[in-house]
Structures are given as structure tokens and as C-alpha cells.
Image (tube, rainbow, N blue to C red):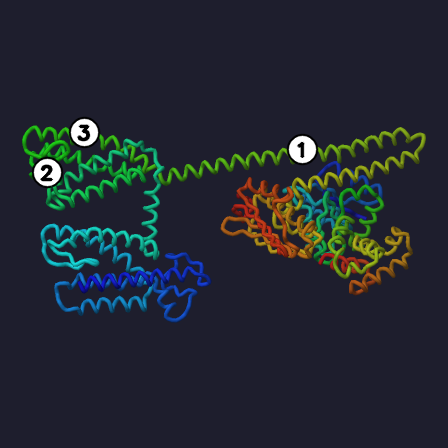
Amino acid sequence: MRIVIGEDLFLLREGLVRLLTAHGFEIAAAVGSAPELLRALVDERPDVGIVDVRLPPTHTDDGLRAALAARRQVPGLPVLVLSQYVEQLYARELLADQAGGVGYLLKDRVFNDETFTTAIRSVAAGGTVLDPEVVSKLMVRHSRTEPVTRLTPREREVLALMAEGRSNAAIGQRLFITEKAVSKHAAGIFAKLDLTPSEDDNRRVLAVLAYLGS
Amino acid sequence: MYYEFLVVTLVVWSYVLVAWCHRTAADPPAGADPPGADPPGAGTAGPAGLRGLIRARGWGLLLTPVALVYAALAEVNGGNHLGILAGVALAGIVMAFFPRLAATIVPYALLVLGAYGLVLAKWLHDGNNSQVLYGVVLAGAGSWRTHLVLPQAAVFFLAGLWLLLGVQAPGAEQVRALVAKWRHSGRGGIVPAQRWLLLPVVALLMELLGPHDWFGTDWITGAGVIDIDIVVGLASLVLVFRSRVWAATLAEAGLLVFGVYGLLILELGTVPPGFAYGLSALATTGGHLVISGLQGAVLLTLGLWLVPRVMVEHLVDPELAARAQQLTQRVESLTQTRSDAVDTAVSELRRIERDLHDGAQARLVALGMSLQAAERLFATSPAAALALVTEAKETSSRALADLRDLVRGIYPPVLADRGLADAIRALALDSPLHTVLDIDLPGEVEMPVASAVYFSVAEALANVSKHASARSVRIELSLAAGMLRAEVTDDGAGGADPARGTGLAGVERRLATFDGILAVSSPPGGPTIVVIEVPCALSSAKTSSC
């Protein structure tokens, strides 16, 4: 699997390269600024671009902008955005095109190899992965509003994990329940929230996020 | 006598009417307009019918007697009374259909009448023996009533001035400003001796001009002349006490004029007979001429000496003094806000230092210790070492979370990345409340101001979710007339007291550094509105300046 990395801090860039190489990923390019990143993403067409939000030249949100620009040129180009902070505002912008193949994680999620590589593979496959911190904020926002209050605690846990972009199998593993039980909960959630059920994982995530983000 | 009776009756009745109108106008519920300030003919709240019509005429009702006096003045010697009837009828029409105009005419008519009285007094004094009806008296040479002309003129003049202010006639503001200026006794750095110079100047003026030119009598024997002297003397005394700068200015002008006058006498050697000039009776004899010249020189010198002092007062006094006062106040407020800003900055730094010390730093130490222990156990007990490494990883995650929270409190990342508008949007997204945004910001706000406004809005929003039991909140952000304005409105219970708690006080101090203000309106039952205003100029490009 070919990967382009956009990260300006040398230590972190090299750390990512080492980590990903160790897990069998192929690094197509590792660059340190937004213009280089945009060029690498468009030219290399990697399976996933791993992008730091804050990049030169202005050291603001250049990386995010470059990723969005690349996705405009190459629709659906999978991008996993890493940042020291997660902002719902940026999450919305990444999800706005509804095309999938988007991830948005805190940088320290890299510490957990398994979570991180799963996220990369999921994004590469066109899935949507959101940091639990973003999801918990979304959940807080709706915690007091109808009809989320009608969900059972277990259903709320499942909803949060669905919003993070996990598959039924992953959710079941996490909550120590069977995949079938997860499907049942998911169906209950979709019925209560009045959403159209979908077998396609990514469509399901987008529906949930669109609901929570409203 | 017939006219006098008629005029007196009309004046008295008109005045009674006017007074009655104003009294009833002041009664509730007719309205809270103060007497004199209610515009005649404005047709505001009041009873309908005749009473309302009369009340609406206000001071304009006095137009009838005033018109009568004018008409009588014009035709007292004529014999037929058509003019009087026409005058009164005209006044009635104006009063009935143009009440506002009538009220405006009255003060000016009274002023003109007063001025005419002065001329009339001199005219009668000069021996003209026609009979003239002035005010309520039929004055003529030899009649005792002639002595009532001057007092009446004064009464008319003062009444005119007073009404001018009362009916808000054009020019009232100027009169008021002049009076306010003159009544400012304490102002100016003129020393007492300088303003007291006005009195000898006035005395000299009366001596030179009063007797001969005006009344043709000797100042020692003419009783009327002495009256005038006393009036003018009193007026100048009032000036000396109430407005020292004006007194000194008049004194200075008088000294210059009279000084030149004395020198001219010496130069020309001719004088009108019977006049006096200071210490010297005016005559063409050599001694008197020399004394006149000397006096002139002294007066001129005094006048010249006074010029720069008065000039300074006039140049410095009104505007510069006000400006200096403004600057002083500004310096005081800047000193206060600067010290507040420094205090805030220092306590912020202390908080950051403490948070780092107890948070991230402590966790990094723990991390180091875990790794150290893992290193030691690595060979002997790999399983225990692995557990320690996992623990170290978690500790580093928590250290990062600490740092994230800290940085958010210092300068929120979205604010740094995107500026104020998006930072407020991000703030709204993070709020658990339902938030409606109305942001109209055509450019970038300078970073320090943006930061202050951001944290102010954040504090207001935090208060809403903590205390207001509100369901939704509306945030407006706009720029109008160089003022950046943020408004946070919730639909909560209201009754918030901005004096309680330290949050809003801190916000107020923070905003004061930028001359910004915070206002809270929170009636019981809501809604609570928090308004933040900071002077600020936007720039459409990134090169911002506030």
C-alpha cells in the first residue's frame, strides 16, 4: 500500500516513515510543506495521504487546505489528517464532499499501532474514521436532545463507535458482544433516529455523522 | 386711558391663560413634558375641544397683547382704530392656524419692543412732546408716565430673552451657550487685578460718552444718567465676578481705545467742549493736553500689557483646556488598563507555569521513570517491562492531552489558523447548546483584539451553559462604524448579575485594554443579552490593523 506523508517536523516525519515501513506500507513520498504535499498527492496518487493540519508556509491550516484541494482535483483521494488538536469545524469540512475515504485523528493515536494501521486501511478502502474526541463532542451536543435521549446506554455506545467509523465486527470486539448483536443495536438506533438503514459501512457512517453534525 | 386698560387686561388674561395651560399640561396623565419645553402646537397628548386647542397654543397666546402694543404704537396719533383691529385680527389668525410660528414670534417681538423702549426714552428725554403709547403707559413730555418707559423696556427685553429659551426659538441655543460661558466664573488663569481693570474702564466710558452724547445733561445733575451709570456699573461688576476672562478682555479693549484717544487729544490739540477725560477736564490749554497725553500713554501701556494675558486665556481656554482634560483622563484610564493588562498577563503566565509543572512536566518525569524501570527489567522480566512500556505510552498520551488543553486556553488553534469568524464557529460547534450564528465580518481582525473577543464570547457562552438553563443561544458578530460587536443572546431564565462571579469582571478588564466594553442585560425571565464592543478597523487583506 503506497503512502504519501506530509509532516514538517523532521522527528515526527521520520518516526512515521519508520513505523509505517515496519508495518509493510510503502512510502511513496514524505514531504514537509503544503505545496510539495499537494504536488505529491496529485502526482503519486497514493492509496492514502497522511497529512498534518499545520504545515509551512503559513503554519496555519495549510496541510488541511492542501488535502482538500487534492481531493477536489482527485475526487475520493483517501486522506488521513493528523493533528495535535481535533476540531469539529475541520471534521465537517473534510466530510463535506460525502465521498468517503477520509480520516481525522489526533497525532497521539499513532501510539497505538493497531488502531492506527486499521484506520489507514479503512480510509484507503474508502471508509470514514473520526477521532473519538470529535465523536464525544458530537455526542455531548446531542445528549440532551430528542430523540437521542430515547437511546439505551448500550445503543449510545454503539452509535459513538459507528460515528468513529468502526465496522460491526470491530464494535462487537470492543464491546465484547457478537457481531449479530451489534447489527441489532444498529437497526434499533436507525429506527429511533429515523435514518435510512444501509448495509454499506461508509454510507452508514456518513448518515450517522450527518445526523450528529446537524 | 382706554388703551392702557385694554392692554393691561389683555396681558393679564393672556398670561393667566398661558399659566393655566402649562399647569394643566404638567398634570398627569397629560404627559411628562416639563413646562416651557413642550413645543406649542405640537398637538401631543391632551384633552380635545376648546381646552386642548388653547393649551396647544402655549406661549403663542401672548401674541395678541404684543400685536396690540405694536398696533397702538403705530397709530396713537392717527385717531381711527382700524389698524389696531387689523393687528389684533392678524395675531388671532396666526395664533389659530400657525401656533408654532406665533410662539416663535413673541420672544423676538418682545426683544424689538425692549430695544425700541431705549430709543423712545432718549427721544422723550430730548424734549420731543408727542404722545406715545408704550406698553401700558401713554408717555409724553412732562408726564410722570415717561419714567415708566425705561423699566418697561428692560422688562420687555428680559421677558423676550427668557421666552426665547422657553419656546426653543431659533437662536436659543446660542443664547444658552453664551450664558453658560459667562457663568463659568472659575475658569481662566486671569489674576483678580486684571479683571478689576474693567471698572475704571467703565467709569471712563461713562464719563466720556454718557452725559453729553446720550442725554445731553451734566453727569453730576442728571438723575437719569446716574441711573444708567449704576446699571452699567452693576453689569460690569457681575461680569467681573461671573466671567473673569470676559471682564479682562473688555478691560483690555477699553484701555487700548482710551489710551489711543488720550494720545490723539495730545496730537490733535482739539476737543469738544465740556467733556472730561480721566483726571483732566478737556480743554485746549497746554497743561490739560499734557495730562491727557500722559493718561493716554499709561492706559495704552496697561492695555498692551494685558493683551497677551487675555489672548493666552482665549487661545488656551475653551478648546485646549477641554482637550488637555480629555488627555489627562485618557492617560489615567490607560494607566489603569495597562496595569490591569500587566496583572492579567502575569497571572496568566503563572497559571501556565503551574499547569505545565503539575501536568505535562510531571507526566514526562513519570514517563522517564517508567522507561527507566522497563530498561532495568528488560533482561530479567520482559513481561513486566512490556507492561511498563505500555504505561509509559499512556502517560505520554495524557501529557499530550494536558498540553492540548493548556494551549487551547492560551491561543485556540482555529483562531490561529482561520481568524475570529471561524474560531467563533468552532466554539459554537463545541457548545452543547443549540447555537444560531450570525457572523458578518468582511475582513480580518487583528490578533490581540480577536483573542480578547474570542475569550469574551467563550466566557459568555460558558456562563449560558452553566447557569442560564437555556435551550438555545444566538451569537452575532458584526462590524459597524469602526466598532466590533459581539452579542450573545440566550433563551434562559435571565436574572444574571454581572457583578457576581469573577468571569465577567475578568472579561471586562481584558476588553478595557482595547477600549472595549461589556454590557449585560438580564431581566428576570430572560432573555439574557451580553454585548461586547471593541473599537476596531478591519482590513480586507491579511495585513490587518486595528
Image depth: mark 1 or mark 3 in front: 3
Q: Quadrant of the N terminus of chain B?
A: bottom left
**Figure quadrant of residue B364:** top right
Question: Label 1 to label 3, Cα distance in Å?
Answer: 73 Å
Q: Secondary structure at mark 2?
A: loop
Q: Are marks 1 and 3 on the same chain?
A: yes
Question: Label 2 to label 1, Cα distance in Å?
Answer: 87 Å
Q: Are marks 2 and 1 on the same chain?
A: yes
Q: Which residue is mark 3?
A: B298
The amino acid type found where label 3 is placed reads: Val
Sequence-earlier tag: 1 or 3: 3
The chain identifier of the residue carrying mark 1 reads B
Q: Secondary structure at mark 3?
A: helix
Q: Is residue A212 above or below residue B46?
A: above
Please provide percent x and percent y for residue B295.
Answer: 15, 30
- Side of B457 relative to B107 (left or right): right
The amino acid type found where label 2 is placed reads: Phe
Q: Is residue B85 above or below residue A202?
A: below
- Of A111 and A41, the residue lying toward us: A111
Q: Residue furthest left?
A: B285
Q: Which residue is mark 1?
A: B350
